[in-house]
Amino acid sequence: MRLHSNTMLMIILKNQTCVIFFFFFFCCFSFEANAQRQINHQSLFWVGSVNTIRFNEHWGVVADFHYRTFDFMSHTYYYITRGLGNYYFNENLTAGIGYAHIWSGAFTTAPHPFSNENRITEQVQLNSKKGKFSISNRWRLEQRWQQKIVNNAKTNDYRFTDRVRYAITFVCSPFKNKMLPSFTNYDEVMVQFGKEVVYNTFDQVRFSFGIRQNITPRLNVDLNYLYVYQQQFSGNQYLQGNTLRLYINYNVGWKKNDLKKKSALVPEEE
């Protein structure tokens, strides 16, 4: 049964309100408990390349790479490479499964190893367009195998966790000229579960705003401010990151007239 577009928009806006509520709830809770919690304040820089390729009406893939530094651009702490296969029920609803490998370092300038993480991802994404607004809701489930570091050395032991993520992205395109920028807002909340998850079922929240600039009909660039608030495994240690994020998004349609369509599709967030 097809849901009326106005009803769908109301549901999506309610979801957006819930995400923002959780974001401010966790932030306010952290400030109240500052005496017990150790907060690591960092200035971060994230850059990513996200490539979406459509093979036909129903099948496509997303291939992306991400590089992250702390102390702004001074020190590397994170690499991600990922591939995800998508099934398109229609132009607005997709379901996908993929694999990512992550190399994760520490927020220190001292010599340290990068741990490995193997991650399997399942997700559903619902996109819609209402006037000048494009809205994307994404539900994601992840199975994560994270290598343990003991005494600053890699081990053969891995920590297994499940993580649930909900993200909503708004894109406002106020200009008729498609080469003028759009404005973006992205919010996400993550929780995790597992035998070794004792103190940090809450994982993190993210909130960002910025601009999207079209370079060509297939290529655009996102430049955002991103706030990250993440709880560590110890339970009383937190990362608070003020982040400059640069994403380069490349989209290849499965037929030529795809480039002429006004799509509500919003690029992947990692």
Image (cartoon, rainbow, N blue to C red):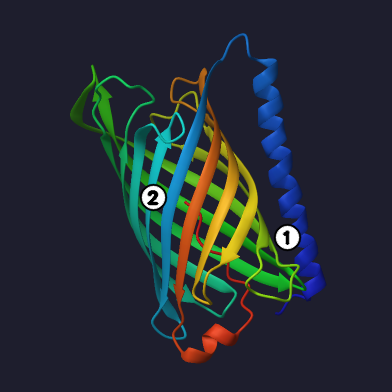
Picture mark count? 2
Earlier sequence position, callout 1 versus callout 2: 1
Q: Who is closer to the viewer here, 55 or 220?
A: 220
Q: Position of residue 211 (x, y in %)?
A: 63, 56
Q: Residue 36, percent across and down?
A: 59, 10
SS class of the residue under badge 2? strand
Which mark is on residue 12? 1
- The residue positioned 76% from the left and 67% from the top of the image is 174
Q: Residue furthest top?
A: 35
Circle 2 packing at 10 Å, graded few (<14), some (14-19), many (20+), is: some
Closest to the camera, between mark 1 and mark 2, is 2
- Relative to 124, say whether 18 is above or below: above
Task: Give the image quarter of residue 54.
Answer: bottom left
Relative placement, left or right, of 213 versus 135 is: left
Question: Residue 121's quadrant in the figure?
Answer: bottom left
Mark number, residue 66 = 2
Q: Quadrant of the N terminus?
A: bottom right
Q: Secondary structure at mark 1?
A: helix
Vertical order, 50 against 202 (above or below): below
Q: Amino acid at mark 1?
A: Ile
Write the residue at 64% across / 80% down.
262
Q: Is residue 135 left or right of residue 106?
A: right
Instruction: Measure how far apart labels 1 and 2 are at the Cα level.
Output: 28 Å
Callouts 1 and 2 close, C-beta under 8 Å: no
Q: Position of residue 161 (x, y in %)?
A: 39, 39
